[in-house]
């Protein structure tokens, strides 16, 4: 890709980016969020058209008018959020979107496709039962289906967008082996990530993007410190555990007893969970995505009524299944899904600032809203939490991920919470924003807030938590002291292994 | 081989949202010109007559406002609900119920009250009847999680049957059974002159009271959306139900309240039909049930993008179109052609919305990129 430039209203997402990947290599695209990785891959997969610049494939210039052109040219993409149809079988999902003329028959031949899918799975060590339905599969298996889809379409260039975000350390290892095997066959694998250790583990070369520009292409043997420096443009401290000055107070702020919560698919997603968080303590809940973290967080914050168990906040029993009761009791919530749950996406930043407090006397009098006060509060929040935005009248969805999370955190802290439930608070954020968010979480704890941190990122939990519990299939399966536990031990518990 | 493909627009320039509606109306007139020419009418002449009949002169405006009034009510009713992503398709039935309620109040009170009091009673009863009718799908949605599109739509047919029943199939209080003639030829009890809703005529245009009422309601709704906590909650719920729940909003109550308001506005439209124009509960097939005000209101709301004032503007324009259609049709101009014309204009206006979000691209050679790329070393055999 040569001199790719892509502008969005008010943003230069890609500024004459050069990118080159060779046949048979795993090439990592490293950069903070907002660095232009997603835009670049969207251009390569035909979703966006570049304003300037050229794409050359195997020595010939290519022009993509739509994603199907890119697929025809042999480019496959594994998105961070899977594009699968849950009630369909693996084979059906693989067939879906197949639009090559020779496959465009009125009749489908399920047996033939199933056999082919099974063969591909065998060959690359990513076997999945072709007749299983997607909803029956684990997240890791679903990712395999996405890769199989690309292989079935004979993709010669495979792009993976943050593929390890949903995997255990062991599953990630297995994925890396598959990717290496594919590269060894002469395919090109483009691996998008902002995790340095993964990039070093799997890639041959690394192209670093920063602020929409391609900064450098270096060998993956470069040190983590060098890569991080290129990525953020300054020296960073890498996930070093910081001790907080204030020792935690002994009283328990949040106590969960025998909590069971039903999942979306029926069956209990959280099974008889008991745990306590003291004032000023950060308890990390580690686990692979989809093991009940979301349901646990939603039950505590009232978003989802539990089927059994009690929740105590500051010693008082919380009315379950009622978010308003949780808010009133001082439970703040940084939800996993920032854009759809944490904010109302098409409403303004100002409106989202008072999303929870609009009922209070400060911003409303009787049934009327006091817009002036609301705007003042929003301006103050934007200033205090360094949310970078041209104005508070902009829609929340126009903010980048990091700024959006600052907005959510700022709003949640301004409610003076006793308990903070933070679900994957840094997912998809860049290094700089992660540092900021971690800083806010530490600060909250040192001010006496009891923090329950649910995260799939083990490094994050190790860096922040005073205590680590592991959740596997809805049960707490381990209780670790981050000072003494090893990553292997915790990883094993996350995968459901015996200790 | 040239190929046409539709691609999603990545950015939506602001000028498009002005240019596209204007252009789509222009296109609709071009298409219609072909139809008119094919059927032996002079397009330019027809358009001139159309425009004259709708918007030139006080008589034209008077008729346009009469046609527009019910559309304003049903358009606003739909806009209120749609704004919260609550798909109340039942303005049609709620309008019937409003007419039943309004006429009932007038008949029950009799002619010997002050006009102001009668109007007030008709409005209250009409709004209440429409509101209660809308609450049926509202309650089902809030407590039973049913799909309000289906329940509200189906209730339209029930309301239609109820209307017919009250006049044609029963000795209800709405039916005139005072004479032998009305007993064999069913007829509704007419309102007395003292119960007619007044009109306002600055210069020579006659403005029905119902029209002013609708404008007033639009102002109230705009205020509700913009300045109140209730409107804030509606906006958030309409944007993201999950975010609303997260913020501790009582979504269920809001569904009930918004359905009630939506039904009340449609019900007022029904009362206005009785008080302003029909002066009786008109159950005939040419009356309320033939007009499809409720369904046209959905189009009005959509074209007005749920903004109360824009809804009023669109309502007046569509009212003018309907009025002009009535004027045009005659011996040399069949009513079917009027319907075709109105249909084409609406079709183009709504179809134009697509162009704001998508763009059409014509490609000279398709798939130039696919075949001429060397294959990967290991190509799995299909």
Image (cartoon, rainbow, N blue to C red):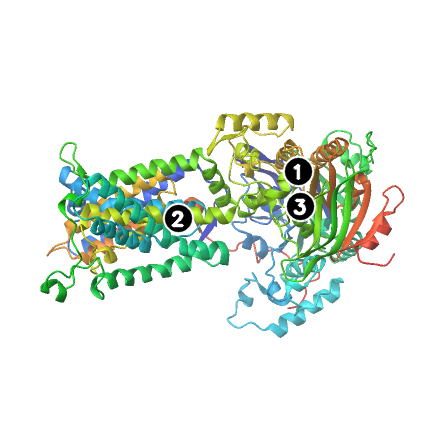
Q: Report helix, strand or loop for mark 1.
A: loop
Circle 2 sits on which residue? B260
Say which of marks 3 and 1 sits in front: 3
Asked if labels 1 and 2 share a chain, the reply is no
> Which residue appears at 52% of the width and 70% of the height?
A105
Q: Residues within 10 Å of mark 3 (few under 14, many from 20)?
A: some
Find residue A390 and report its horizontal and vertical position in percent.
Answer: 55, 28
Q: Is residue B264 left or right of residue A29?
A: left
| Label 3 or label 1, whichever comes before in sequence order | 3
Near-viewer residue (A499 or B373): A499
Asked if residue A25 shows in the view, the reply is no
Q: Residues within 10 Å of mark 1 (few under 14, many from 20)?
A: many
Q: Is residue A207 left or right of residue B237?
A: right
Find residue A386 and report its horizontal and vertical position in percent.
Answer: 64, 28
Q: Report helix, strand or loop for mark 2.
A: helix
Tag shown at residue A318:
3
Count of numbered circles in the view: 3
């Amino acid at each position: 890709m040569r001199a790719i430039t892509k502008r969005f209203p008010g943003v230069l997402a890609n500024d004459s980016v050069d990118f080159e990947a060779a046949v048979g290599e795993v090439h990592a695209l490293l950069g903070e969020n907002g660095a232009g990785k997603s835009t670049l891959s969207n251009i390569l997969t035909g979703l966006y058209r570049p304003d300037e610049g050229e794409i050359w494939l195997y020595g010939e210039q290519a022009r993509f008018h739509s994603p199907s052109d890119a697929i025809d040219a042999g480019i496959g993409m594994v998105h961070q959020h899977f594009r699968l149809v849950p009630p369909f079988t693996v084979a059906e999902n693989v067939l879906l979107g197949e639009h090559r003329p020779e496959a465009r028959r009125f009749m489908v031949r399920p047996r033939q496709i199933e056999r082919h899918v099974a063969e591909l799975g065998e060959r690359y060590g990513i076997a999945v039962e072709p007749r299983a339905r997607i909803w029956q599969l684990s997240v890791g298996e679903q990712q395999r289906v996405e890769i199989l889809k690309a292989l079935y379409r004979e993709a010669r260039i495979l792009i993976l967008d943050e593929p390890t975000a949903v995997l255990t350390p062991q599953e990630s290892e297995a994925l890396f082996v598959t990717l290496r095997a594919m590269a060894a066959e002469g395919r090109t694998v483009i691996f998008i990530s902002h995790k340095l250790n993964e990039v070093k583990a799997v890639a041959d070369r690394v192209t670093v993007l920063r602020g929409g520009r391609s900064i450098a292409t270096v060998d993956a043997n470069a040190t983590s410190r060098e890569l991080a420096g290129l990525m953020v443009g300054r020296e960073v401290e890498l996930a070093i555990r910081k001790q907080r000055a204030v020792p935690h107070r002994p009283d328990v702020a949040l106590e969960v007893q025998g909590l069971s919560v039903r999942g979306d698919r029926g069956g209990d997603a959280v099974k008889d969970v008991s745990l306590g968080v003291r004032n000023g303590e950060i308890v990390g809940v580690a686990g692979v995505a989809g093991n009940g973290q979301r349901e646990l967080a939603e039950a505590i914050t009232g978003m989802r009524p539990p089927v059994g168990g009690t929740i105590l906040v500051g010693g008082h029993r919380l009315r379950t299944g009622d978010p308003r009761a949780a808010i009133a009791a001082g439970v703040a919530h940084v939800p996993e899904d920032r854009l759809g749950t944490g904010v109302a996406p098409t409403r303004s930043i100002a409106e989202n600032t008072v999303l929870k407090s609009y009922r209070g006397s400060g911003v409303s009098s009787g049934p009327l809203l006091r817009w002036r006060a609301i705007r003042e509060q929003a301006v103050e929040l934007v200033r205090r939490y360094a949310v970078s935005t041209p104005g508070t009248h902009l829609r929340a969805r126009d903010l980048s991920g990091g700024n959006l999370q600052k907005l959510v955190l700022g709003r949640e802290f301004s409610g003076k919470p006793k308990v903070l439930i933070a679900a994957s608070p840094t997912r998809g954020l860049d290094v700089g924003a992660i540092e900021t968010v971690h800083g806010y979480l530490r600060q909250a704890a040192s001010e006496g807030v009891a923090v329950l941190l649910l995260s799939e990122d083990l490094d994050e939990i190790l860096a922040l938590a005073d205590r680590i519990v592991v959740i596997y299939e809805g049960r707490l399966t381990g209780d670790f002291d981050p000072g003494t536990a090893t990553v292997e031990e915790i990883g094993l518990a996350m995968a459901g292994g015996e200790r | 081989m040239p190929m046409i493909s539709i691609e999603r627009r990545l950015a939506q320039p602001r000028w498009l949202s002005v240019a596209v509606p204007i252009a789509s109306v222009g296109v609709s007139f071009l298409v219609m010109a072909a139809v008119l020419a094919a059927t032996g009418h002079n397009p330019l002449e027809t358009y001139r007559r159309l425009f004259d009949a709708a918007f030139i002169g006080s008589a034209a405006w008077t008729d346009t406002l009469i046609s527009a009034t019910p559309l304003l009510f049903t358009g606003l009713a739909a806009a209120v609900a749609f704004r919260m992503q609550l798909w109340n398709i039942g303005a049609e039935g709620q309008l019937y119920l409003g007419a039943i309620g309004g006429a009932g109040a007038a008949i029950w009170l009799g002619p010997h009250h002050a006009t102001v009091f009668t109007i007030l009673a008709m409005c209250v009863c009409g709004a209440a009847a429409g509101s209660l009718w809308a609450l049926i799908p509202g309650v089902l949605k809030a407590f039973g999680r049913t799909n309000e599109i289906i329940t509200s739509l189906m209730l339209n047919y029930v309301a239609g049957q109820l209307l017919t029943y009250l006049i044609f199939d029963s000795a209800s209080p709405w039916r005139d059974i005072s004479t032998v003639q009305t007993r064999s030829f069913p007829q509704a009890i007419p309102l007395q002159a003292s119960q007619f809703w007044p009109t306002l005529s600055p210069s020579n245009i006659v403005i029905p009271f119902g029209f002013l009422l609708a404008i007033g309601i639009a102002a109230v709704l705009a205020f509700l959306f913009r300045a109140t906590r209730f409107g804030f909650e509606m906006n958030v719920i309409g944007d993201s139900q999950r975010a609303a729940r997260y913020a501790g909003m009582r979504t269920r109550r809001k569904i009930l309240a918004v359905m009630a308001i939506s039904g009340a506005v449609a019900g007022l439209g029904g009362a206005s039909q009785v008080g302003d124009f029909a002066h009786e509960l008109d159950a005939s097939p040419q009356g309320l049930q033939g007009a499809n005000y409720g369904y046209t209101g959905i189009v009005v709301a959509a074209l007005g993008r749920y903004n109360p004032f824009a809804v009023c503007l669109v309502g007046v324009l569509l009212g003018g179109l309907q009025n002009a259609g009535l004027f045009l049709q005659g011996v040399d101009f069949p009513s079917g052609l009027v319907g075709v014309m109105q249909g084409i204009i609406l079709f183009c206006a709504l179809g134009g919305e697509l162009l704001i979000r998508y763009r059409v691209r014509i490609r000279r050679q398709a798939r130039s990129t696919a075949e001429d790329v060397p294959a990967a070393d290991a190509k799995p055999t299909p």
